[in-house]
Amino acid sequence: MTTRVWDYLEEYGAEREDILDAVDTVFSSGRLILGGSMRAFEEEFAAYHGMPHCVSVDNGTNAVKLALQALGVGPGDEVVTVANTAAPTVVAIDAVGATPVFVDIDPDTYLMDTTQVAAALTDRTRCLLPVHLYGQCVDLEPLRSLAREHGLVVLEDCAQAHGATRNGVRAGTTGDAAAFSFYPTKVLGAYGDGGGMLVRDEDIAQRMRRLRYYGMEERYFVVETPGHNARLDDVQAEILRRKLTRLDGYIAARRAVAERYAAGLAGTGLVLPSVAPGNDHVYYVYVVRHPMRDRILKALHDHDIELNISYPWPVHTMTGFSHLAGRTGPLPVTESLADEIFSLPMYPSLPERTQDRVIDALREVLAAL
Ligand SMILES: *Cc1c(COP(=O)(O)O)cnc(C)c1O
């Protein structure tokens, strides 16, 4: 059987009764949209983070987009972020009419190089958008100081970092707002699409609630500005409530996989993930690096193991973002990384025998290079 980087069927087998009960709970409740499950999930997700407000939405891209709008970021504004991210981070910036400005990444963690942010600021910069990529946190302290000094907002893209901490502080609790995705592969994943935003400020939370509901507060009355339809489905919300109670267990299981990989692959020449001091990594993806990446992927494919690349094309090199050309300086670390990284199978229910199969195949292939 082909080994894939992600699979949910093992987990579904173990949690099937609970998931089906969640579906039945919503179907039987008499309220399918903006119902009790959605509100309960928002309260519980906020409480998990010790935050006053969670506003749920239909996916992570809209979480970034609505958070930007609620923070007042729009046409003419510049948003400083990274090109080594999932395209949706930048799709959302583009969708609100703002211009992404990319800084390069740290060569060890592959996260935003925060020392480059000050030089990227202009009088149009409005927002700093760090991405807690792969499951570990960007150091937000230097970004917060810059934001204070220059009157900017900080939006954390937490789509890959549910439950991750830095110096004991959870991802999503430091910036002016945070955006999460609950896409099925994510560390907290639904059985379909989902997303959410965390925010401390009551007025911004209220604006987020309006933006996901056409711009309405009371029914049938658009208050401030036309919004979107971006509601989280109650069925997904109820499933997420159930899975939130198991989130710390999923994270522990991911860490155990990472430890097994690290032990099994030490000394092979693969560059293994580097965890920054103070970070507790949640291993959304397990990213390794090797100059002969493409040969390794092909050889693993011959072993019936399909690996993935997160991400093969830095955002600024994609033709769909060619309208940004010329605005971004060279990003040498980002660009060389994209040719060398790949990700190993990673999900909480990944059987140990499959982990060992991946380790053995990689050891064999690397020894023969
Ligand atoms: C998954 C992801 C998103 C988008 O989430 P969707 O739910 O797929 O819209 C945004 N940013 C990052 C970093 C992601 O990994």
Image: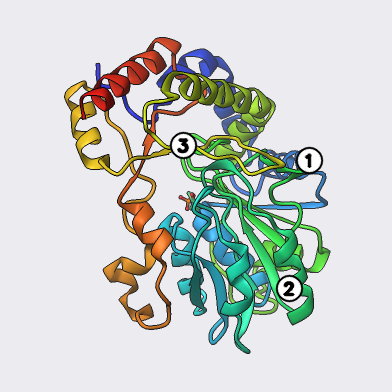
Residue 46, numbered label: none
Residue drawn where x is 51% and y is 13% of the image: 14
Q: Earlier in the sequence, mark 2 or mark 1?
A: 2
Please give left or right for residue 322 compared with residue 101 in the image: left
Q: Eyeballing the image, is 112 above or below 108? A: below
Q: x%, y% of residue 24?
A: 57, 26
- Residue 281: name its quadrant: top right
Q: Position of residue 121 (x, y in %)?
A: 61, 81
Of badges 3 and 1, the one in the foreground is 1
Going by the numbered disc 2, the residue's amino acid type is Ala
Name the spot of residue 102 as percent of width and height, x first.
48, 70
Residue at the spot of label 3? 185
Residue at the spot x=47%, y=37% of the render?
A: 285
Q: Secondary structure at mark 1?
A: loop
- Hey, which residue is sitting farthest bottom in the picture? 123
Q: Which of labels 2 and 3 is toward the front?
A: 2
Give the amino acid at mark 3: Thr
Q: Is residue 128 above or below residue 351?
A: below
Instruction: Place residue 351 in its image quadrant.
Output: top left
| Residue 191 in view (yes/no) | yes
Between 248 and 317, the residue placed more toward the observer is: 317
The residue that label 1 is drawn on is 168
Measure how far apart labels 2 and 1 are at the Cα level: 22 Å
Q: Nearer the viewer, residue 108 or 258?
A: 108
Check mark 3 vs ligand 1: CB closer than 8 Å? yes or no. Answer: yes
Q: Quadrant of the N terminus?
A: top left
Residue of label 2: 147
> How many marks overall?
3
